[in-house]
Image: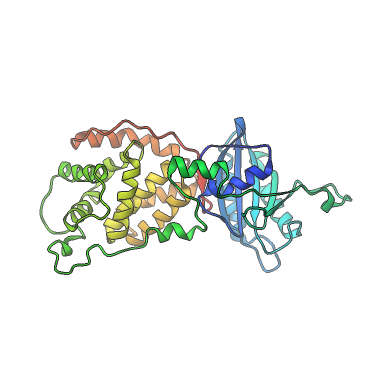
Amino acid sequence: MSRRTPFSADPGALLTAVPALLGFVPERSIIVLVCGAEHTVEATMRHDLALTPDGRPTTELIGVLDHLGAICADYVPAQIVVVIADDRYPPDDARYRRVMAVADRLLAAQAGVCRGFVVGEFASGAPWSAIWPVIAEGRDARSEMTVGILEDPWSCPTAVAVAVVHGRPLLRRREEIAEMLAPEPGCADPGCRHHASVDGTDGSVVDSAELFATVVDSVRRPRRRLDCATLAELDRAITELRVRDAAMALAVNDDRDNAEKLWRQLTRRLTGSGRASAATLLAHLHYIRGEGAYAGVALDIALSADPTWSMAHLLDDALRTGLRPAILWTTVSNCYRIAEELGQTLPRPTLRRASWASGDGG
């Protein structure tokens, strides 16, 4: 679920990096960090901090923490750091300690919560407080509480590395991911002779090899806006299952950045199964790179566009179950084989295997 990130002994540095690990700035959230051997953050998982009116974890939140505990059990050895990002109460409020106690119990498979922190907001100069483990009874919790100040999450080393290496700027909120995939007209000209065939159903027969060749050509010769004829052919291509499966190989080689741009454009301009397939290809590309928040949003869009799209369901189930990106590598060789059968020799895989960062709890 996340990029493998060095784990610093300095809590402030680790906390400052949390937004970059997720890809957006979390608010009113609980974040679980799985810190593995060699001082690395192996997984980052987030969920809304849902509290009852009296400040107790809701049944839903307890279920989420139980689920995250099962995911964390797969990481051995590991230490668990839990971060509460919330601005509703003081850092030493009993409500937050109660949430930490529940998390500690449900994460028992990893010896519970190693360290627990509260951050009111992720901003430069914002204070953070360590609230777990609980201070020994009878001592002044306020004087014993470890506190510090966050650095700038937008310019910390992790944020810079993600922006430079992955071209992924830090977003101010999770909703911006969906906004980048908002629908736009496939063709604004009602007189265009391809306008009615943008759903890929003009009735002509095109060979799968020709369709995949169009996909590869569109990836390698990117255009700011596809013409309607090419858009219609790509619609047909990515809804043909062998072509779609071959196209998944583009997520792991030097074509992946251009493939991402193409999947984004198709997600925005196609409808129905075409939009679902494009969003699923985009979700697969993000998932295998360890970008769980982006993958989750893309899968929501895919299933909304076509609730029967089976590959979207498979990826969505894997994401919600907490399966690591490594599971997707088991299909890469098959994708390359299909691409070869369709007449295309693709560059060898160059993507490094990612760990895991989920922006929505799994």
Please identify the quarter of the rendering in which residue 303 is found: bottom left
Up/down of 186 relative to 207, above or below: below
Of 345 and 309, the residue lying toward us? 345
Please identify the quarter of the rendering in which residue 40 is found: top right
Residue lying at the far right of the rendered structure: 138
Residue lying at the far left of the rendered structure: 204
* Residue 206 % position (x, y): 12, 48
333 sits left or right of 230 in the view: right
Number of numbered discs visible in the structure rendering: 0
Q: Residue at x 51, y 52 (%)?
A: 359
Colouring: rainbow
Q: Is residue 311 visible?
A: no
Of 185 and 354, the residue lying toward us? 185
* Residue 177 % position (x, y): 44, 56
Up/down of 250 relative to 276, above or below: above
Please identify the quarter of the rendering in which residue 63 is found: bottom right
Q: Residue at x 44, y 53 (%)?
A: 296
* Residue 6 % position (x, y): 58, 36
33 sits left or right of 113 in the view: left
Q: Residue at x 60, y 41 (%)?
A: 34
Q: Residue at x 76, y 59 (%)?
A: 94
* Residue 54 % position (x, y): 71, 67
Q: Is residue 253 visible?
A: yes
